[in-house]
Amino acid sequence: MTKEFIPAVTASAEQSLHEALAAFDFGAPVVGAARYGHGHVNDTFCVHTQPPEDGCGCFILQRISAAAFKRPDQVMANIIGVTEYLGKKIEAAGGDRSREALKVLRTRDGQISYTDSLGGVWRVFPFIRDVRCYQSAETPELFAASGRAFGRFQRLLDGYPAGTLYETIPHFHDTEDRLAKLKAAVAADPLGRAGHCGAEISFALEREKDCSVALDAQRRGVLPLRVTHNDTKLNNVLIDKTSGRGICVIDLDTVMPGLSINDFGDSIRFGANHCAEDETDLSRVSVDLELFARYTSAFLEGAGGILTPAEIEYLPWGARLMTLECGIRFLTDYLEGDVYFRTSRPGQNLDRTRTQFKLVADMEDRWEELAAAVRAAAGR
Ligand code: ADP
Ligand code: GN1
Ligand code: MG
């Protein structure tokens, strides 16, 4: 697919919603569309249709974030490639591809996305029913189910031709580059916010060396590049209501060549604690070792032996670095005026920064315990 570079859109998604709804073939009249989910980046709507029989139809309609993705055509090309590959693998293993893999619904003229008159790019997936999507790990079993699903996701994509994937966000998990961008934001300080986040800025700068740990290991050939998801939050896996299994990994915009330890680590960052990303009571923020251990065992089980001993050894670094990097990203966005991550109140990105840095400090304090939990899960 070749498409022109799409300019950034600043218009609200609601402005173009009707245009987008008219562009797709939902198979029945649309009776409603409402904002849906808790994503920080894309604009997501749930669309209901009214077929003549069989209850109502349900779809996920999304406007791809122009701030995050400069080439939505490449995002969609990756998603088509990966979902078709996963679908075939799932079918071959006797699974139900309509529930275990996303499927892209075409527009009325057969395209995989629709560009509205303001430049926003939209896509649709059939809604997977009888699932739940969690914002926090309500039970260890639930968190383990997500770990198994993300481990399995990596195993299923082990043979995928990684060279055919576009890098949808260049330097996405390049922690050195993230720190460099933070330094630039501190220097520019367009809104004069740096003055009241000196402690957070120092916290990041003091960890400059850490930012190179995984990248150095990759450069030395110790950690291999794989096809990875890169955004493995608990709310990016759908959990089957009946079985409690993590059945479908969603939010495939950032599937790219990357490090397995980052997929592991981003899940730990988001899920192995008991508070929201923007919790303001920092005394509540800490890593839950039981959740950490349960996730690790399940992730390794799902990965089914594809991970190398070095990848397993570096898993705690994945957790520490994804958390540090995410804090750096929230802080950069705070300094730049909250232009990337959606916020619903002033100071939210700074609060998010603080939770991430508190988690990093906790991981540093309990480093040996994390390493021991990984060794135990790996049977060493
Ligand atoms: P974002 O990139 O903004 O996080 P997601 O692709 O993760 O967007 O979608 C947001 C939410 O929509 C998810 O957390 C999930 O609750 C729901 N969702 C997305 N795709 C589907 C689907 N195919 N079936 C059911 N729910 C979905
Ligand atoms: C964003 O899109 P969403 O909400 O699943 C972000 C992740 C961050 C996360 C922090 C494309 O994820 O990288 O870790 O917010 N996604 C992108 O909550 O930047
Ligand atoms: Mg998401």
Image (tube, helix red, strand yellow):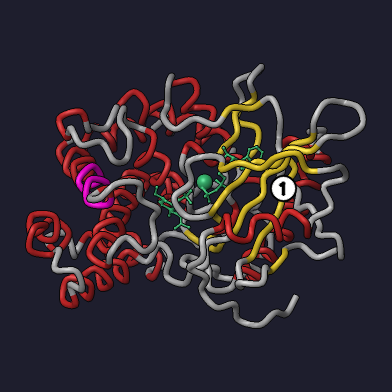
Query: Residue at horizontal 76%, vertical 62%?
Result: 112
Q: Nearer the viewer, residue 51 or 39?
A: 51
Residue lying furthest top: 242
Q: Is residue 38 left or right of residue 243?
A: left
Q: Position of residue 23 (x, y in %)?
A: 78, 60
Q: Is 352 within the magenta? A: yes
Q: Position of residue 375 (x, y in %)?
A: 35, 34
In the rendered image of this protein, does residue 111 appear above or below residue 308? below
Query: Residue at horizontal 29%, vertical 32%?
Result: 372
Q: Nearer the viewer, residue 114 or 92?
A: 114
Report whether residue 7 is seen: yes
The chief SS type of the magenta part is helix
Q: Residues within 10 Å of mark 1 (few under 14, many from 20)?
A: some
Q: Position of residue 6 (x, y in %)?
A: 59, 77
Query: Residue at horizontal 63%, vertical 61%?
Result: 16
Q: Nearer the viewer, residue 374 or 30?
A: 30
In the rendered image of this protein, does residue 272 appear above or below residue 180? above
In the rendered image of this protein, does residue 323 appear above or below residue 174? above
| Stretch in magenta | 349-356
Query: Residue at horizontal 66%, vertical 72%?
Result: 117
Report whether residue 153 is seen: no
Question: What type is the residue that disc 1 sits on?
Answer: Phe
Q: Is residue 243 left or right of residue 99?
A: left
Residue labelled 1 has its Cβ within 8 Å of some atom of ligand 1? yes
State the image quarter where residue 221 is shown.
Answer: bottom left
Q: Is 68 within the magenta? A: no
Quadrant of the drawing holding the N terminus: bottom right
Residue lying furthest right: 52
Which SS class for mark 1? strand
State the image quarter where residue 378 is shown.
Answer: top left
- Mark 1 = which residue? 125
Quadrant of the drawing holding the C terminus: top left
